[in-house]
Every structure is written in structure tokens, then in C-alpha cells.
Image (tube, rainbow, N blue to C red):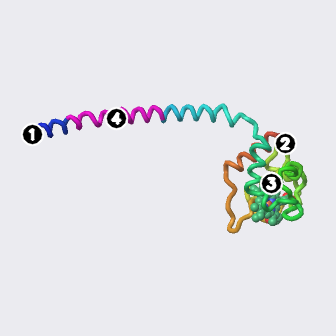
Amino acid sequence: MSPNTVKHSEQHRGAVVPSRVGRRILTIVALAVGFLLTGMDVSAQGPADKPVSFKDDIQPLLNSQCVFCHVTGAENGGLNLGRRDSHAALMAASTEAPMARVTPGDPAKSYLIHKLKGTQLEAGGSGNAMPMYDPPKPFPKEQLDLVERWIREGAQKN
Ligand code: HEC
């Protein structure tokens, strides 16, 4: 191989490789934009318009974050959040504050929301924010939004 040939092929590569990479990047960008548009479409018309389901959205959240302390209703705040009793228990009056745990259509008059936000004292209640952790760990915003939306939509046993 003469030094000339080597130089030539390097130049050749130099010219071809970037444009191939460039095309690949364009393809990736196009796919990403397409993906984003599809995603936006789904969130604009899909889950946001679908009513929150107590069975499919709320109960799983109670199961994973609350039930291990609120099992029988005999102990913590007299509140049983197990699958069979949770809806009725949430509709009942609070044992800590002068309001229902859940007032259908009105998150601000739902003690459950105050406990999840940590505003239970302002609401005339007592005790800790829920879920109760030491040190306190805020209840995730998306989950709070979901519970609020379920209440605004009528707190149905759907
Ligand atoms: C580590 C145990 C623990 C966990 C986890 C927990 N709680 Fe509690 N909960 C308590 C205790 C203890 C009380 C009573 C004392 C207080 O309010 O701080 C209580 C009280 C409550 C009350 C007030 C009851 C009433 O009569 O109004 C509500 C509402 C509540 N919890 C909801 C929840 C929800 C919803 C979750 C899950 C997101 C949860 N808790 C997770 C221990 C727990």
C-alpha cells in the first residue's frame, strides 16, 4: 500500500462517515419527534379523559402504601383500607377532624386529602401526615392528583 492510497481512503472515510452519521441522527430525531407526538396524542385524549377508577387506580395505591397500617380498622384512626371495606371507610366521618374523610366532589372538605398533603392541623384535625413515615416522606404529587381527581369526579366506587 502506498502512502497515497492510505491518504485517499482516509479522506474518503472522512467525507462519507459524517454524512452517514448525520442521516442516522436525522432518522433518530424524526423517530423521537414522532414518538413524542404520539405520546402527546395519547395523553391528550386517553387517560386524562377517562374517569379515575376506585378499583383500578385508588385501591392499588392504598394497597401499596396504606393497608399495612390500616388493616382492621381497630387500630390506626379506626380506618380500614383493605379492599372490602375501604370505600365505605373513606366515606365515613373522620375520628380526628370535623369533616368526612371524603366529601364527594370536594377535595378541600375531604380529611383524607389534608392528611395526604400534611394540612391536617389547619383543617382542624390532628396527628401525622399520611402515609406516616419517620422521617416524613411526602405523598407523591401524581398520586395526590389522582386521589383529588377521583374525589372531584364524585368519589365513586367504580
Ligand atoms: C406507618 C403506619 C401508617 C401508614 C403507612 C399510613 N397510616 Fe394513616 N394513620 C396511621 C395512624 C397511627 C393514624 C392515627 C394517628 C394520626 O392520625 O397520626 C392514622 C390516621 C389516618 C387517617 C385519619 C383517620 C380519620 O379518622 O380521619 C387517615 C385518613 C389516614 N390515616 C389515611 C392514610 C392513607 C391514605 C395512607 C396511605 C397513603 C396511610 N394512612 C398510611 C398510620 C399509618
Q: Earlier in the sequence, mark 4 or mark 2?
A: 4
Residue 112 tag number: 3
Secondary structure under tag 3 reads: helix
Q: Is residue 18 magenta?
A: yes
Q: Depth check: give the residue in front, 95 or 19.
A: 19
Between 20 and 122, the one nearer to me in the picture: 20
Position in image of residue 60 (x %, y %): 75, 49
Secondary structure type for disc 1: loop
Q: Residue at x 84, y 42 (%)?
A: 157
What is the C-alpha distance between the residues marked 2 and 3? 16 Å
- Residue 41 image offset from top left, x and y in percent: 60, 31
Q: Is residue 84 left or right of residue 37?
A: right
For residue 48, which quarter of the picture?
top right
Please provide percent x and percent y for residue 33. Answer: 49, 33
Q: Which residue is mark 2?
A: 157
Q: Which residue is mark 1?
A: 2
- Front tag of 1 and 4: 1
Q: Please state if 75 lies on the left or on the right of 33 as rendered.
A: right
* Label 2 vs 3, first from the N-terminus: 3
Q: How many C-alpha atoms fall within 10 Å of the one at disc 2: few (<14), some, or many (≥20)?
A: few
* Residue, disc 4: 22
In front of the other: label 1 or label 3?
Answer: 1
Confirm if mark 3 falls within 8 A of ligand 1: yes
Under mark 2, the amino acid is Lys
- In primary-sequence order, the first of circles 1 and 2 is 1
In the image, what residue type sits under mark 4?
A: Gly
Q: Vertical placement of 110 versus 127: above or below?
A: above
Residue plotted at (77% across, 57% down): 66
Disc with the residue nearer the chain's start (1 vs 4)? 1
Which residue corresponds to the image point at 36% horizontal and 32% vertical from the top-left? 23
